Image: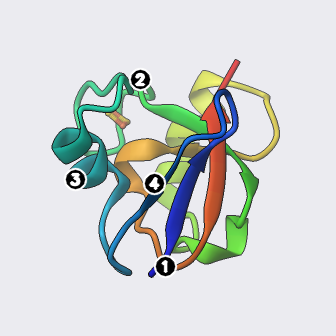
Amino acid sequence: MPKITFAANGQSFDVPAGQSYLEFCQSHRVPQDFGCTVGSCGTCRVVLVAGADNVDPITDEERETVEMCTDEKGVRLGCQLVIRGDVTLRAAE
Ligand code: FES
């Protein structure tokens, strides 16, 4: 079962493969900010510190939103992440 680890505090959680990060946060009351939940506002920006290949690839629409919001490398939208394997993430700057 894939594991989500939060770099800020080292906490890890097992998640079913294919679960969205949004669903995970809602069911575990993770203090992750979300806005639109459809990839257009950029509120949910996170950085995959490890396991970037263990989520679904970024789409053109997600990339557009990220590029409108930040120049930071490795940023993904939390509401668009589907967890396929172990990941470690942190909040974007
Ligand atoms: S919540 Fe709006 S882009 Fe993720």
| Mark 1 or mark 3: whose residue is earlier in sequence | 3
Q: Residue 84: which numbered mark, if any?
A: 1
- Which residue is denoted by mark 4 in the rendering? 61
Along the horizontal axis of the image, is 83 left or right of 89?
left
- The x and y percentages for residue 7 are 69, 37
Tell whether label 3 touches label 1 (CB within 8 Å): no
Tell whether label 4 touches label 1 (CB within 8 Å): no
Residue located 52% across and 57% down the image: 4
Other-residue count near label 3 (Cα within 10 Å), few / some / many at <14 / 14–19 / ≥20: few
Q: Residue 23: which numbered mark, if any?
A: 3
| Mark 4 or mark 2: whose residue is earlier in sequence | 2
CB at disc 4 and ligand 1 closer than 8 Å: no
Of tags 1 and 2, the one toward the viewer is 1
Other-residue count near label 4 (Cα within 10 Å), few / some / many at <14 / 14–19 / ≥20: few
Residue 30 visible, this orientation? yes
Three-letter code, disc 1: Arg
Distance in Å between CA atoms under marks 1 and 2: 23 Å
Distance in Å between CA atoms under marks 2 and 3: 16 Å
Three-letter code, disc 4: Glu
| Mark 1 or mark 2: whose residue is earlier in sequence | 2
Along the horizontal axis of the image, is 61 left or right of 76?
left
Distance in Å between CA atoms under marks 1 and 4: 20 Å
Other-residue count near label 2 (Cα within 10 Å), few / some / many at <14 / 14–19 / ≥20: some
- Which residue is denoted by mark 2 in the rendering? 43
- The x and y percentages for residue 63 are 58, 50
In the picture shown, does residue 64 fall above or below 60?
above
In the picture shown, does residue 51 fall above or below 1?
above
What is the secondary structure assignment of the residue under circle 3? helix
The one of 78 and 4 positioned closer to us in this rendering: 4
- The x and y percentages for residue 71 are 78, 28
